[in-house]
Amino acid sequence: MFKQVLVKLTETSRQNGFKNREVVYLDFALAEFASAIEMLQAAKLVDQKMLAKGFLRHALDEYEHTEFFKQLLKDDPTNHIKFDPRLAEKLGFLRTDLFLFERKSLQNFSAFIAVNEANALKVFLNIRPFITKTNIEKIPRLDQIIFDEIEHLTNNQNQNEVQQIFSSLLKDEARHARLSNDYLKKVVSPWTFRYLKSKYWLGNKVRHFWASHKKVHSVIDGIVTKTVIFLLIKFRWALNFSSNSRNNEFNKSRARLML
Amino acid sequence: MKYLIGVSGFYHDSSVCLVADDQVIAFIKEESLTRVKGSSGFPYRSLDHLKSTYALNNQTVEAVSFYEKPLKAWTALISHSLTQPQSAHNLIAHHAKQFWRGPLSFKVKFDKCLKLDTDKFIYAPHHLSHVLTAQCYMPSDGHYSSVLHFVFDAVGDGDSISVYSGMHADTRLLHNIKFPHSLGLFYSALAQVCGFAVNDGEYKFMALSSFGDPQHFKHVFDNLIMPSGPELKLNMDWFSFHKRLDYGFSERLATSLGGKISPCNLVPGTEEFKRAANIAAAAQQSLETSILHIIKFWIDEFKPVAITVSGGVAQNSVAMSKVIKNFPDLVVTIPPSPGDSGAALGAVNYASLVCKNRGIRVKKLAFKVTSQSRSNLSKDLFSKISKKPTEAISLAASLITSGEHVCLFSKKMEIGPRALGFRSIICSAKKSDAVRRLNVMIKGREEYRPLAPVCLDSVATRFFKISTRSKHNHMWMASTVFVNDDFPDEYQSALHIDRSARLQIVNSDAPLLEAILVELKGKEDLLINTSLNVAGDPIAFDLIDAFANMKRMGLKYLLSEDGLFCLNEDL
């Protein structure tokens, strides 16, 4: 997974479980799904066959991880959130115009994957205690339900197997990070290597800082929205265009109109 | 060669259609390239793909047609929202933002991909785009003395239901019903109560309806829709799609139906499943009654010999079967892609009528697509079992009889949402375990959803109750059918719980599937056909997608025009 999840992993959430765990699982599922699609596209667009195979393998791994988080969502009977792939575009996990591979050179693409896979590894390590330390007496009742459902996911087997699935996810992420790192080291000078890694590390920090200040966003959005609504109400009369649809619709000059 | 381009986008199921010499030469759904089902943005990737494949530029493109009148659509929706600024402020904000993000920016976004002269841009009325899509698929080139066209939509250009008459450039609007009185949004809101996503789960909700009893919630549904003459009104106290973005139903409606249902709880046999099925059955019945009411009113008035039904609601193949059944003397046509995705075809037909005064007609079920792969990776993904076409077909047929699942992958791809033998997975309908495995284990579909059978024409009339005048719709699975009384027991797994099936009658338009059915004639007269994708993903576009999907589903065999192949496991 090299698409970053939007959830804030606080100490409280690690110890007591996430307040909105279905949102967390949805975020992880979407990030994995978006990563799978980016990798699949990279496999199609890259010229070298060996790289294409590697990207395709990576994509298949990411699809498998998506299924894991989708299953967590599905297994929660209290959950009203459903995995909807379109959210990957709406929430910015995927851009609608260009894929990552189209926006970056192969070197930049590899650097991006290396840095972000390493971040993903940290995120997985952060949520691992939440999965493994879950305790019936200490966690809210719903956390217990979700843990039961995780056990359903692994065919009613024991908790160790849930950890095993997580371990295999972690190993995959580590492998993805290592492969991208190795490739990048091969194709660029040590200075460029450091520059690219720092660039994406810093870029990530800035993006995360901006993404985590949602209150600022909503205040700005609220002011702009209310001003626009006020203006629209005042000038509502201007929106009531009359258009007679029964006129000949096939007239060329009429066809050029947006109204 | 001069091209015409039709574009649908910005809401859901974006697509691009390309026409040259009055023939459709390409149709690409944006989801095929984004790999996100129901991709809703501007179709950048489809356009870019077509631009590079066909060398599109300002000299070669004659006109580009968008499938709605953006300003009309925007003003209609925002004006309506402004009537209730207090309760609909989020919706107003959303519409306001659409001014620069949405369809009004069509030309700006198009120019990013392909710079064309301003006078080449055309905007087709949305419902007219749907009508012109349907006209492309009418038998006898639509040469009927009197034709009516019905559009049942969510909302388009501020209209939700429209009735047109005439053909080609003589198509005229007779009547329309305005937003928010929309059957599409009514159905989506009810599907949402049962945990289904809007513009995504309606077909599952339709499948669920066969398990329920419509009488159970009759007391609620009697208050929701009020049809009268050519009009139809929704009681808006029960809905909220005209005020809110997140939920289409009001608190009152959810409470009356026993509360919102979690999508995770739709397990057959449970109480929640029964309740959801009862809601679905009542919604389906209300939808069908309303559609039939509107159609009957106009048929009594105009006495047409042929009608078309299109718009998003026409994707409800169960409701469409009721239309065909209730009007057996009429030629009823429902296009293969009656929703917004297919409207790109209607938009390009509009451009052809405006620029050349000639309509286009589509004679194919699928169009050629080219792979995006730059490294020829696809050659390493499969090993050839048999190259000779006849041997490959016969081997594939024997695999099917032995209970295997075989993927069909053609150089062409279907226009609509259904796999018609170009991107399909097929298996024997006699082997119920293979059918169930395909549905639930391999594809990951919900078990209450049926799979569709395919057969040759000679078998279809023997097994199913088919209206002869409207038989052409079964070439692209536009409607369901019920079985005849002597339907063989051995094919039971091809039927839904109510003994209906969304049948595809196969002919030479789908050569791979036809060849298999001919090979198996007498042994396996009915096969199961489903799309080549994991549930929730778009249908495979190129061989790399086919490989990825097959690998994820654990499928091995792939039949194409080039032979029979086996998936390379050691990638």
Image (cartoon, coloured by chain):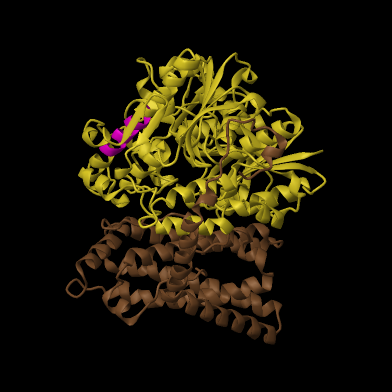
In the rendering, at what x and y percent does residue A73 appear? 34, 59
Please state which of residues B245 and B397 is positioned toward the viewer in this rendering: B245
In the rendering, at what x and y percent does residue A90 appear? 49, 59
Please state which of residues B25 and B240 is positioned toward the viewer in this rendering: B240
Residue appearing at x 29%, y 34% in the figure: B282
Image height of B412 relative to A54, above or below: above
Q: Colour of chain A?
A: brown
Q: Colour of chain B?
A: yellow
Q: Quadrant of residue B139?
A: top right
Q: Quadrant of residue B111?
A: bottom right
**B304 is within the stretch colored magenta:** no
Identify the magenta region: B278-288
Image height of A232 relative to B249, above or below: below
Q: Quadrant of residue A222?
A: bottom left
Please state which of residues B466 and A59 is positioned toward the viewer in this rendering: B466
Q: On the rendered image, what quadrant is the C terminus of chain A found in?
A: top right
